[in-house]
Each structure stands twice: as structure tokens, then as C-alpha cells.
Amino acid sequence: MIDWKSIKDLHVNKKLEQIIGNWYGVDIFYTDEQARVQLIGQQADYPYKSPFFKLQMSHSFGKDWLENDVEKVFEHFTNIQENWCEYESFFPHLYGYSQKVILDGDCIGSVFAYPYFKDTVTSEEMEMVVKKMVECGVAEDDAKLAVSKIKKFSEKDFFKMKELSGIVSDEISTFHSEISKREARIMDLNSEIGNKYRYHNLVGKSKKMQQVYHLLSKVSNSESSILIQGENGTGKEMVAKAIHYNSPRKDAVFMAVNCSAFNDNLLDSELFGHVKGAFTGAIKDKKGVFEVANGGTLFLDEIGDTSPSMQVKLLRILQEGTFMPVGATSPKKVNVRIIAATNKPLKEMIAKGEFREDLYYRINVINVTIPPLRERQEDVPILIDYFVQKRCEEAGLPLKTFSKKCLEKMLDHAWPGNVRELQNEVERLVVLAGEDKVITPDMLSSRILEMSGEQHHSSHSSHSGVLKGVNTNGSLKDAMEELEILMIREGLKRCAFNKSRLAKELGISRASLIMKVDKYGLDKRAQKRAAGE
């Protein structure tokens, strides 16, 4: 939809309207693609160029007469190929001009120039216009004065005015085209930003997560088996769900089974089902998850914990699509996409004879490795925001924020339990905060407070440089702060203020380093700005 107010306010259109008005005494107005007049008559102080048009629009039926002309023009446009037309108005011998606004081959509106006489008009014909206005209730003196001010167009005047109106039309097309391109670009960027930080319910902007998203976007539409590898708590099941819900199978069922949660016999029944009487307690037939997931996706978590005999059965279903329920005498056929996951080193297990090599290659057609949280620390603030918002919404609580010191300690933590540990900690903090809007360091788990202290120590000891001049008197907290300031100040000089490099050296996240630099006023540019002031 065109913003006609913005169109009219365009500098070039204002100038063109002014030129056309001053030279030819006509008003320029616009109609949309549905022949609705825009802006004219909506302002009491509208700056009309034509006294006649002003008098017409002050009449109670003035807009109706105008709309009658517009409808006539649009009917005319439907019957001709030309993008412009000259028309006789509601008042006999009084003319107007209309030019289509074309964008991508479609008419998105029109530009009108009105009113004018042709230079062949006679005084009798002009008197007919006055007479019609008087019949409509306009005072005769006002009508005569207004009609006397109407310009008479020569053929040259008409073509000049037509050319200028065409420029107005082109400017509208260009402007609307640029606006449309900008809006499309904004939508693309919004989509890009959304996809940049998220893929389904996965959250993260780090380079490693971008690589994971890129791979998932490629493999989701395939039917290939996928092996997801990563430490406990990295979100392997979330990745499996993301693959399923972005695949052609998204409307079918997604089933997940933790292979380490069952002994071999129970896992057999869980996966493949059993028939009545197959074993003690089997009082009726039971479908296994393979059968339930037919047409959908089955996620086999901790596949590295399966026994050799179970691996043989899994290999068969992957190769042939058939399985045998416990106690059954005939096989069943299913169409299931397999996504497996493990935190175990399967290649090492193959070398030891603990995992079948042929099964490994069957499940590992596509490999997705999920990085641990310690290798993507820049995702920690995003994940914290995500979990806080999610938990507060679920609990019906106002959105909570972290104090600067608390966030600093969260960023310093190594998160050995990965995303699951971070999620649990955030949920715990939201509960402990109660009605408080700000989450403070005293609410943090002791392990986070202890490990952040250890991290400072290990970071210092791993650095090859020697720092002197730290005051060993006073409290440990003051000494630690002094050491922190000294290490960061010296490190910034050494790394030429490259915060990414220094954060890596110190073993902390870049976000945490930036907070500390800001806290201690160590930013070189900020210091220069302050000195300038």
C-alpha cells in the first residue's frame, strides 16, 4: 500500500506541484489503484493552486463531482492501452488530465492535473461553467471570479504539463519501488537475524553454532540417517527435534528413546514391541516405538550403550526397514528416519570391538557435532536471556534482569554441564529471586562462585608474564580486584586493545572482559573522550 502522504511530501514532487501550479494554475492530486481520491478535501487549510478547484471543493457536493470525474477516467483506462488521458469534467468544457502510476506493469494509482480550459474555449462555453456552478448553489460573483482565473491551454502548454505530470508519476513509481525494496530487505534482514541466533528451538550466535545451523538447514530435507555427537547437556535431542520439525516428516510423529535407560530385554520390547504371551507379563500385544513412529522420525539417544545383539537388530532395520516384535513369527515393515546420538567415542569403541563398524557407517551418513558451551561462551548471554524470558513467562512473573556483577560471574563460569546446567541455574535463580526484579550474585550456586574464583587463579597462573606491584595487604577481595585490573590493563596494551585475543588469553568470555574493562574504566577510547571533555 502506498503512503500517499509521504508521496506528496517528497521534495521533488512538492517542487513539481509548485511549478505546475504556478505556470498552469492547476492542482495536482492523486488517486489510489481503487480510484479513491487521496488527501484532497481532508484539510481545511489545503493550499489549492486553482481558485476554481478551491471553490468546487468547498461545496457540499464538490468531492462527489470530483469522484465522478475520477470514476469516468478509470473506466476509460480499462478500455485503452495508453497510460494517460484527457477528460471533460463534471463542468462542460472544463478539462483535466490523468497519468497512470505504473510499477512492475501494474497500475498502482494515478496523478491528476485539474482544472483547465483549452485555448479554443469561447466566452459562451465559459459562461456555461458559471451557470452550472450557480445552479449548484454557488454565488454568481464567486463563480464568475473563479472561472475567470482558469488557465487556457495551448497545445504546447498541454504537452509541457503532460511531461511534468509524467515526471511526478515516475517519481512515485521510483519512490514506491525503493520503499518496497527496503521493506523486503528489512524483512530479509529480520529473517536473517532470527535465523542467525536461532534454528527451531536452538539458540546461539557463535561461529560454531552458525556452522551447526548451516548444516542442519542442508540435511533436514534429506532422508539420510544422522549421528549427533556431543557431551551430555549440549542439547542433542533439541537438535534431533529441529531436524525433524524442519523436514518433510514434520507433520508425522517424533519419538525419542534413551537406549541407556533400559536393559537389553526391555529395550528390545520398547523398540520393536511384543506379542501377547511373548514373556511373563505380556498380557496383550504392544507396539514398539519403531511401529509408532512409522512415517516419522525416531531419535535413538545414547546409542553407544546398546549391546552387540541389539546393534545387529538396529542394523537390520536400517538396511531393510523390517523388524521382528518380541515373540512374533513374521516381520513388520516400517518407514522411519533414524537420528542417533551419543557422547561416547564410537571410533574407539569400534577398535575395541564394542560397537559394530557396519552400524556406525549406517547411522553416521551425516554427522552433526554439537560444541560444548565452554567453546561458545559468546552464546551464554543470549541463552541466559532466552531462559529467563521463557521461565518468567511460564511462571507469570515480570521479566527479571541480572546485576552486572552476577552476569560477570555467570560469564566467567565454564559450564561443565553445558546448556542443561545453564538452564537449570537460570530457572533456579528466577525461583530464588521471588518478587525481586534483579538477580544478584548472592543467589548464585556455590559451585559457580567457587569456580569463577578458581578460573581467575588458573588464568593468572597460565599466563607466562610476571606481574609485580600488587598490594598483598588488606582483604583478599581487594587484592584480587587489583590483580584483575593489572592483568587486564597490561593485557590490553600487550594485545593492542584486541579484546577477543585477550579474552582467549585470560580464559574468559569476550563479553565478560568487556564488562570488566567498562567496570574498571580501562577503555582507551573512553579515556580519550573523557580527556577531551
Image: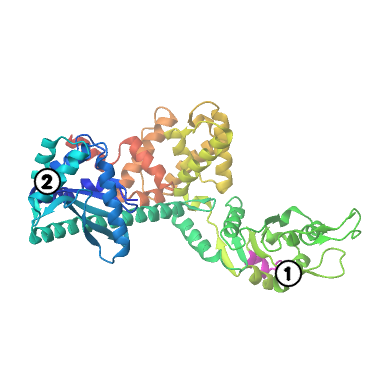
Say left or right for 287 vs 404.
Answer: right
Alpha carbon of mark 2 to alpha carbon of mark 1: how far? Answer: 96 Å
First-in-chain label (2 vs 1): 2
* Residue 37 position in % (x across, y down): 28, 47
Which image quadrant for residue 487? top left
Residue at 48% across, 38% down: 453
Which numbered circle lies on residue 317? Answer: 1
Residue at 27% across, 56% down: 73
Say left or right for 299 vs 157.
Answer: right
Say what amino acid the circle numbered 2 marks. Glu
- Of residue 504 and residue 115, the one placed in the foreground of this image is 115
Q: Is residue 352 shown in magenta?
A: yes
* Mark 1: secondary structure: helix
Tell me the magenta residue range: 346-355
Residue at 40% across, 44% down: 511
Could you tell me if residue 244 is visible in this image? yes
Could you tell me if residue 109 is visible in this image? no
Q: Which residue is mark 2?
A: 127
Q: Is residue 418 shown in magenta?
A: no
- Of residue 144 and residue 178, the one placed in the foreground of this image is 144
| Number of marks drawn | 2
* Residue 396 position in % (x across, y down): 56, 32
Say left or right for 504 vs 107.
Answer: right
* Mark 2: secondary structure: helix
Front disc: 2 or 1: 2
* Residue 421 position in % (x across, y down): 58, 44
Q: Main secondary structure of the magenta part?
A: helix
Pick the quarter of the image with the C terminus. top left
